[in-house]
Image: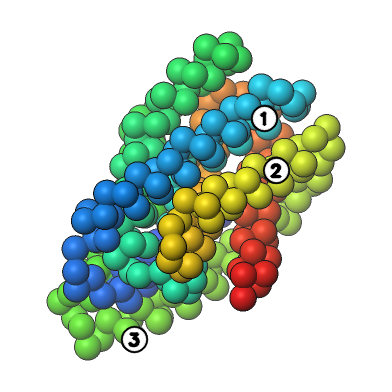
Amino acid sequence: MDPATLLKLVLLLGVVLMVVGIGARVQLDEPLLLLHSPTLTLRSLLAMYVLFPALVLLLVWLLPLREGVGAVLLGFAVSPVLPPWAKKGTALGARADYVIGLELLSTAVSLLVVPLMIAIAERLFGVTTHLDPKAMVTVLLATVLLPLGFGIGIGRFLPRSAPRLAAVADRLGSVVLLLGAVVLLFIHGPKMLAVIGEGTVLAVLVVIVFGLLFGELLGGPDRSIRGALASATVSRHPAIALLLASGAFPQQQPTVIGTVLIYLLASILLPILLMRWRK
């Protein structure tokens, strides 16, 4: 097994463990909030899959970004919520039935929105991407649906052991993911530095700031849901963005990987600043 494949498996293991821990920790005593609150569902979809992608399309169309950068941003705009985000959502005070519901909703919606974005990008920019639908479904099953369902099953059938198992899975997942991220930055750090300039960082920052703003404006009167939606709007699945951008620009892998890492770093740091400002 080559080092690159091993690193991917390590990162996948970290994500899976964290999602299992999240699922085991939540208590879904009521139906998912989004199922009996259509207005909140529509506002969440409007922020995440209408306004956010529209903003990204406008920026990619207006700014002379280097080849591959726009594809990454468009990929993030239609990707589902990053799986470990659920931990941040509950930390912001949002109800578990909203956090889990939004995670599942974004996963389902992205399966419909991704082909639409591919068609729009091909028409507007003349860029075609080769995306294997099976690869996308496999990523979502492995990193979101299966571990989340397994964790919820633990909480349901082993309620006494669930808190302890959730804590163990969460800590192990955090450590594994952190170590994998450090190695990833060490390996691909030069690629990240190489794409700085030509408006790349500015475009990423503008996209994330406006994404946070959309979530805050459309989250409604509940402050915790506003914070959770703002965070979810920008905390998107990097694997889907990577699949889309790599399929569109296979010859620009260093640029694609570097932009993905810059976006991930900014999408982690800026919501933290927002949280501190809100407090």
Q: Earlier in the sequence, mark 2 or mark 1?
A: 1
Q: Is residue 161 left or right of residue 106?
A: left
Q: Residue at x 44, y 74 (%)?
A: 93
Going by the picture, which residue comes out furthest to the front?
221
Residue 59, which numbered label? 1
Type of amino acid under label 2: Val
Q: Nearer the viewer, residue 127 or 221?
A: 221
Q: Residues within 10 Å of mark 1 (few under 14, many from 20)?
A: some
Q: Residue 86: give x, y in percent of width and height.
A: 42, 64
Q: Is residue 162 left or right of residue 268?
A: left
Q: Residue at x 67, y 59 (%)?
A: 270
Residue 164, which numbered label? 3
In the displayed structure, would residue 270 be above or below residue 61? below
User: Mark 1, mark 3: which one is toward the viewer?
Assistant: 1
Q: Residue at x 31, y 42 (%)?
A: 108
Q: Earlier in the sequence, mark 1 or mark 3?
A: 1
In the displayed structure, would residue 238 be above or below residue 56? below
Where does label 2 land, which residue?
206
